[in-house]
Amino acid sequence: MPEAASAPVATEARRATIGDSEFDRDTAVVRRAPGVYDIDLSAGWTIISAVNGGYLLAVLGRALADALPHGDPFTISAHYLTASQPGPAVIRTDTVRTGRTLSTGQASLFQYDDEGHEVERIRVLASYGDLDALPDDVRTTARPPVFPPMDQCFGPEDGPAPVSGSSAIADRLMLKLDPSTLGWALGAPSGKGEMRSWFGLADGRDADPISLLLAVDALPPTAFEIGLKGWVPTVELTVHVRARPAPGPLRVSITTRNLAGGFLEEDAEIWDSADRLVAQSRQLARARLS
């Protein structure tokens, strides 16, 4: 595979580190009381005016990492109840069970509507553990996705200038998409329901388990390659984190096999620079058919 040094990320002089990057600052939660956290959701992670679902999952994931005795998400399932907006939010967590190797908790994120009423935006249930304590034994038939090296792939900067404010999240990501999944951008979608891309954060910060929660939901929707247009809101998203990612760019592969009744699934795999499958996810999303 291409060397990680070919990644179009920040130079070493400007390269952000885990714990000291825009992503870390924008997902940081402030503990108000045991199990209760405040955050100001950043407008920098929006698509049109809605806050990206992967960013929101990372915010809730960070709150649970603080609330539970284990720090790494192993599995986290989120139901997106109403669209979140940039601005103040409160997260309430509850510990369901703690064990020697796994702890389970739930969390909900709330905002206020125009009348001052509290509205639940997302509810998650998650199990956390210690990724570094897992055995090295891996038995798998999964294989890394095969697509061109980064210098033969294309990102948002290679296309027409977007409408101002339409996708603020794109400025915070390093995306280089496989040309074979870019037919939608040329007005000729393949109909295959596939999206593949190199992935990183624009400031060069390496991936960690929390940022993997963002990565599974950061690519353009597979619905675009099916021939649909517009927003594809997530109904439910489950992520399995399988290993702590090695430094370097990630490869993300997402597929949709079934669009029916106005809903579709997206299955994602994330592979690190050491050719390890570090995260998997499935989400159910609503497709706009007209």
Image: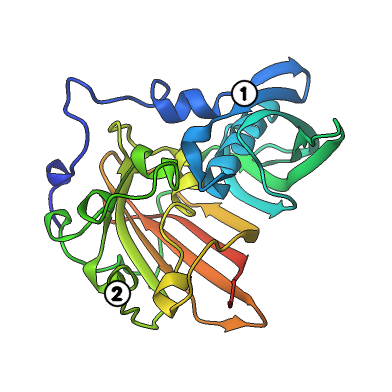
Which of discs 1 and 2 lies nearer the camera? The answer is 2
Query: Label 2: which residue?
Result: 183
What residue lies at 59% left-to-right and 63% top-to-bottom? Answer: 283
Sequence-first tag of 1 and 2 = 1
Give how far across and how far down residue 138 sits, in percent: 40, 59
Q: Are marks 1 and 2 in contact (CB under 8 Å)?
A: no
Is 224 above or below relative to 119?
A: below
Query: Label 1: which residue?
Result: 29
Q: Secondary structure at mark 2?
A: helix
What residue lies at 64% left-to-right and 78% top-to-bottom? Answer: 262
Residue 236 shows up from this direction: yes
The type of residue carrying mark 2 is Gly
The 10 Å Cα crowd at callout 1, few under 14, some 14 to 19, many 20 or more, is many
In terms of depth relative to the viewer, which is nearer, 147 or 70?
Answer: 147
The 10 Å Cα crowd at callout 2, few under 14, some 14 to 19, many 20 or more, is some
The type of residue carrying mark 1 is Val
In terms of depth relative to the viewer, which is nearer, 146 or 98?
Answer: 146
Q: Secondary structure at mark 1?
A: loop
Give how far across and how far down residue 180 sits, in percent: 25, 73
What residue lies at 27% left-to-right and 46% top-to-bottom? Answer: 249
Task: Name which quarter of the figure residue 114 lies in.
Answer: top right
Q: Is residue 22 left or right of residue 74?
A: left
Is 190 above or below relative to 32?
A: below
Q: CA distance from mark 1 to mark 2?
A: 39 Å
Residue 255 shows up from this direction: no
Q: Is residue 31 left or right of residue 253?
A: right
In terms of depth relative to the viewer, which is nearer, 120 or 16?
Answer: 120
In terms of depth relative to the viewer, which is nearer, 256 or 273?
Answer: 256
